Structures are given as structure tokens and as C-alpha cells.
Image (spheres, rainbow, N blue to C red):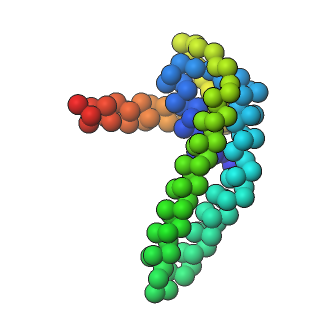
């Protein structure tokens, strides 16, 4: 299972024309995995299981709290990735392809769509700032 925070970081590095090595990617994944397996994934599983009890009086409040905590865990994962990335020596290139280091070949067709979607989102966000 792929981690969305890793994918987003790899796409960001592509936009910055920076290329990771496979060794650097391994460092990033190794920095993230213990926290993800110990905290983020179990909380996400708990949140999904809670849906079976949507008729409980405090269901919405519990779900909201779980989502807020899950977001904090995701932010912590992002921080772990950035801390690790800061120790990596990245190479500049005009055609970075960091996602291909991480995403299986059978998913490569979706990668182009994802890159284009993220580029459109970035452009629309820049237009909203004007």
C-alpha cells in the first residue's frame, strides 16, 4: 500500500526539478513506516470501523475527533519526511521522475493524470492568490 504523503512529496520534488535516488526514497520510507504502522494506520482502521456505529448519540463528535487526530498524524508523517529529506543530497534535472521509484509499473498510467491534476490545482491556487 502506498503512502499519500510520500506521493505528494515526490510530486513536489518533480515540480522543483529535483530527483531522489532509490536509496533516498528508502530512507524516506523507513523514516515514515514505524509511525505510520503504529499510529496513523490503526487510527484510520478505528475510524472506518466506527462507521458501523453511526447510530450512536455521539457518533459525529467521535468521528470528527478521529478525523482531526488523523490529520495531525498525517502532518507528523509529513514532518518526518521533510526532516529526512533535509539530510538528502538531491540532484537537479529537467525531467525528474520520482514517482516511478515508488509507484508500480502497472500504476504508471495514472501517474500522468495525477501530475496533470496537481499542476492544474497548483495553477488554480496561484490564480486565487492574485
Question: Percent x, y for residue 38?
Answer: 72, 58
**The one of 11 and 84 positioned closer to us in this rendering:** 84
Q: Which residue is drawn at the image coordinates 53% and 18% (left, top)?
A: 17
Q: Which residue is drawn at the image coordinates 38% and 36% (left, top)?
A: 121
Question: Percent x, y for residue 100?
Answer: 65, 29
Q: Which residue is drawn at the image coordinates 68% and 27% (left, top)?
A: 87
**Is 2 situated above or below 115?**
below
Q: Locate residue 48 relative to residue 101 in the image: left or right.
A: left
**The one of 84 and 130 positioned closer to us in this rendering:** 84
Residue 20: which quarter of the image?
top right
Q: Would you say residue 55 is visible in this rendering?
A: no
**Is 89 situated above or below 29?**
above
Question: Percent x, y for residue 24?
Answer: 72, 28
**Is 112 situated above or below 71?**
above
Q: Which residue is drawn at the image coordinates 54% and 31% (left, top)?
A: 11
- Identify the image quadrant of the C terminus: top left
Amino acid at each position: 500500500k502506498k503512502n499519500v504523503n510520500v506521493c505528494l512529496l515526490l510530486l513536489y520534488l518533480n515540480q522543483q526539478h529535483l530527483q531522489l535516488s532509490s536509496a533516498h526514497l528508502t530512507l524516506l520510507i523507513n523514516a515514515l513506516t514505524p509511525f505510520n504502522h503504529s499510529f496513523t494506520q490503526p487510527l484510520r482502521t478505528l475510524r472506518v470501523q466506527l462507521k458501523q456505529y453511526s447510530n450512536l448519540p455521539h457518533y459525529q463528535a467521535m468521528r470528527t475527533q478521529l478525523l482531526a487526530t488523523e490529520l495531525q498524524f498525517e502532518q507528523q508523517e509529513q514532518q518526518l519526511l521533510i526532516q529526512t529529506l533535509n539530510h538528502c543530497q538531491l540532484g537537479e534535472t529537467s525531467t525528474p521522475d520520482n514517482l516511478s521509484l515508488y509507484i508500480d509499473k502497472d500504476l504508471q498510467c495514472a501517474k500522468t493524470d495525477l501530475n496533470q491534476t496537481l499542476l492544474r490545482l497548483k495553477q488554480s491556487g496561484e490564480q486565487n492568490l492574485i
